[in-house]
Image: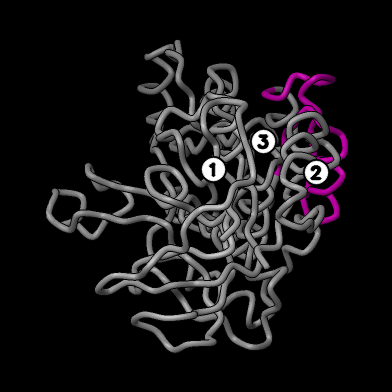
C-alpha cells in the first residue's frame, strides 16, 4: 500500500509499505479521508515532543472496515489513543492520560496511508447522513468538546479562545452550541474572519490590540469565565490567566515546551482553576451524534481535500499559508 512516511523532521515521502494485518481485537480499515492536524505539522517540523521517527503520521480519519472484529463495509471514525488499562488514570476512566499511552500516528502507524489497523474498541460507526467531509472532522472537534468539559462551560458564560486554528474553531463550535458567548483571538485575519462566519461574538487581532484590555472591555471589566489557550506559547498562557475572571478557569490545550513565568499571587487573588486538556475522553462518538443531528456545522473548517500524493503541497500550504488553510484532508483511496 501507499503511505506517507516522516523519516525525520522535514523529511516526508510517499512510500510503498506492506499492507498491515489485523490481530486479535483489531480492525483493518481502508482510509477514505484523513486530516492533517497541527500536531502532524509539528512532527513534520521537528517540534512534536512525543513523535517517534520514522512513522506513518495521521490520526484524523474516516474509513471503511475491510476485515477484523467489525462489520465489513461499515464507515467508521477513529479514537487514536491506545491505553494500558492498568495505571491510575486508566483506573479512573481517564484513558487519555494513560502513563503508557500510545497514539496512532505518533507512536504507532497512523492514518496517512491507504490502509490502517486500529483497535476495534476505538472505532465508532458513522451514520449514513454524515458525509465523509464532516466525519473526518470528528476527532479534532472532539478535542474541543473534551476541553469544554474540562472548562465546565455553561450557557451564558463569556469565554475567550486564544488561537483560531482547527482546535480553536472546534472550541468555538462547541462553545456556541452550549450557549456561551465567544471571543476568538489570533494573528491571522483570515482565521478571524472564519471565526466570525462560524459565530464568534468578538474577534481580536492580537497584533493590533492589547488582548487583555479588549477582553476586559467586552466583559465590562469582569474577565471571562473560561479562557482556552490553544496556541502553546508562554505569552498566550499568561494572557489567558490575565483575562480570566476571579473564580474563573484557564484550560491549556496548546503544547508549550518552554517554562511559563506567571505571577503566583494572581492565582491566589483570583482563586483561578488552571487545568490541562489532553486529546479526548469518550467524546468522538458524542461529536458524531452532534453531526448526525445537524447541531454543529464544521464545513467551513475544511479548507481543501487533496489526493494522498499531494501531501507535499498540503504540508507546505499549512505551514506557509496558515491564514488560508486551516484544515486539509487527504484522500486515502
User: Which residues are drawn in magenta?
Assistant: 183-212
Q: Is residue 250 visible?
A: no
Residue 134 within the magenta-colored segment of the rendering: no
Check residue 225 in the rendering and tell me which mark sits there, or answer none: 1
User: Compared to 191, does 208 lie above or below?
Assistant: above
Check residue 163 in the rendering and tell me which mark sits there, or answer none: 3
- Count how many numbered circles sit on residues in the image: 3
Question: Where residue 74 sits in the image (x, y, percent)?
Answer: 53, 85
Specify the quadrant of the image occupied by residue 90: bottom left
User: 333 or 128: nearer the eye?
Assistant: 333
Which sits earlier in the primary sequence, circle 2 or circle 3? Answer: 3
**Which label lies toward us, 2 or 1?**
2
Q: How is the image coloured?
A: one colour
User: 174 or 20: nearer the eye?
Assistant: 20
In the picture, which quadrant includes the C terminus?
bottom right
Question: Where residue 41 sits in the image (x, y, percent)?
Answer: 62, 35
On the picture, is 276 further left or further right than 211?
left
| Residue occupied by mark 2 | 325
Q: CA distance from mark 2 to mark 3?
A: 14 Å
Residue at the (74%, 31%) spot, across then down:
319
Q: CA distance from mark 2 to mark 1?
A: 30 Å
Mark 2 packing: few (<14 Cα in 10 Å), some, or many (20+)?
A: many
Question: Where residue 42 sits in the image (x, y, percent)?
Answer: 57, 31
**Which label lies toward us, 1 or 3?**
3
In the picture, which quadrant includes the N terminus?
bottom right
User: Compared to 174, does 322 lie above or below?
Assistant: above
Question: Where residue 81 sits in the image (x, y, percent)?
Answer: 37, 55
Amino acid at each position: 500500500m501507499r503511505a506517507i512516511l516522516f523519516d525525520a523532521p522535514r523529511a516526508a515521502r510517499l512510500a510503498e509499505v506492506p499492507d498491515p494485518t489485523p490481530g486479535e481485537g483489531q480492525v483493518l480499515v481502508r482510509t477514505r479521508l484523513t486530516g492533517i492536524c497541527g500536531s502532524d505539522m509539528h512532527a513534520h517540523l521537528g517540534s512534536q515532543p512525543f513523535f517517534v521517527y520514522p512513522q506513518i503520521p495521521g490520526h484524523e480519519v474516516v474509513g471503511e472496515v475491510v476485515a477484523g472484529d467489525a462489520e465489513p463495509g461499515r464507515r467508521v471514525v477513529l479514537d487514536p489513543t491506545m491505553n494500558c488499562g492498568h495505571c491510575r488514570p486508566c483506573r479512573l476512566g481517564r484513558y487519555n492520560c494513560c502513563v503508557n499511552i500510545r497514539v496512532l500516528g505518533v507512536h504507532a502507524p497512523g492514518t496517512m496511508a491507504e490502509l490502517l489497523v486500529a483497535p476495534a474498541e476505538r472505532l465508532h460507526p458513522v451514520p449514513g447522513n454524515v458525509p465523509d467531509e464532516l466525519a473526518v472532522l470528528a476527532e479534532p472537534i472532539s478535542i474541543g468538546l473534551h476541553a469544554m468539559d474540562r472548562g465546565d462551560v455553561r450557557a451564558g458564560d463569556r469565554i475567550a479562545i486564544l488561537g483560531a486554528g482547527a482546535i480553536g474553531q472546534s472550541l468555538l463550535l462547541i462553545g456556541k452550541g452550549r450557549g456561551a458567548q465567544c471571543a476568538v483571538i489570533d494573528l491571522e485575519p483570515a482565521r478571524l474572519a472564519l471565526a466570525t462566519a462560524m459565530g464568534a461574538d468578538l474577534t481580536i487581532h492580537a497584533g493590533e490590540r492589547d488582548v487583555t484590555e479588549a477582553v476586559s472591555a467586552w466583559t465590562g471589566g469582569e474577565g471571562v469565565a473560561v479562557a482556552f489557550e490553544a496556541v502553546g506559547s508562554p505569552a498566550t498562557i499568561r494572557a489567558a490567566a490575565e483575562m480570566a475572571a476571579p473564580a474563573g478557569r484557564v484550560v491549556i490545550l496548546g503544547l508549550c515546551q518552554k517554562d511559563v513565568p506567571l505571577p503566583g499571587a494572581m492565582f491566589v487573588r483570583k482563586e483561578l482553576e488552571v487545568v490541562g486538556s489532553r486529546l479526548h475522553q469518550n467524546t468522538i462518538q458524542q461529536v458524531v451524534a452532534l453531526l448526525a443531528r445537524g447541531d454543529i456545522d464544521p464545513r467551513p473548517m475544511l479548507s481543501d481535500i487533496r489526493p494522498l500524493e499531494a501531501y507535499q503541497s498540503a504540508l507546505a500550504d499549512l505551514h506557509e499559508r496558515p491564514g488560508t488553510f486551516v484544515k486539509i484532508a487527504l484522500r486515502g483511496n
